[in-house]
Image (cartoon, grey):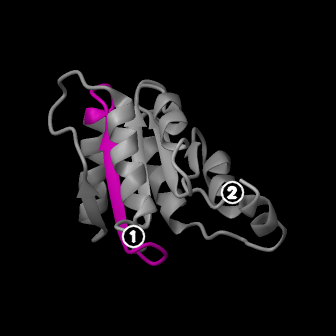
Amino acid sequence: MSNIKLNKIFKTVCIASDHAGFNLKENIKNYLIDKSVSVFDLGPYNNHSVDYPDYAKKLGNRIKLNKSDVGILVCGSGTGMAISANKIKTIRAAVCYNLRSTRLSRQHNNANIIALGARLTKKKLSLKLVETFLMTKFEGGRHLRRVKKI
């Protein structure tokens, strides 16, 4: 991983998970804190069973209200969190599974939430995906017109 400060584009990052994503959420949170990124943890705070839509809604609304710039959601596959978060106006949550999908989610779609699958993506790759997400700028241009149509 790079030693570049990750908070150059975004000042505030929020994170949430369900029980399946709890351990990876904690790993990501600690990694970001070590990199001097301001992280707001929306829970859960243990690995007891919870309903992922509740946490996706909590995080999505925080971004909608401009209390955080971007968010990280973690569940078993990433899909449930992304579907739930994308129900909220202004949210563009992308399930990211490799470096290219992550870069393109930011460059072309201006994604403001990365959704990760703890059961499908190893810790080391997940940390690289989060770093890539936070370091990648939206390209604007022709992509802005398309994002405005969402």
Identify which amino acid the numbered label 2 is placed on.
Asn
Nearer-the-camera pick, 59 or 18:
59
**Magenta segment, which residues?**
6-22
Nearer-the-camera pick, 110 or 51:
51
Residue at left offset 19%, top offset 27%: 47
Q: Residues within 10 Å of mark 2 (few under 14, many from 20)?
A: many
Q: Position of residue 120 (x, y in %)?
A: 48, 26
Give the labeled residue for mark 2: 109
Asked if the residue at tag 1 contacts the one at tag 2, i.e. Cβ–Cβ closer than 8 Å, the answer is no
Give the SS element for disc 2. loop
Residue 1 appearing in the image: no
Residue at left offset 37%, top offset 65%: 68
* Alpha-carbon span between mark 2 and mark 1: 26 Å
Residue at left offset 40%, top offset 41%: 56
Give the SS element for disc 1. loop
Give the labeled residue for mark 1: 3
Tell whether position 53 is magenta. Answer: no
Identify which amino acid the numbered label 1 is placed on.
Asn
| 148 up-or-down from 100: above or below | below
Nearer-the-camera pick, 54 or 10:
54
Residue 138: which numbered mark, if any? none
Farthest-out residue, right: 142
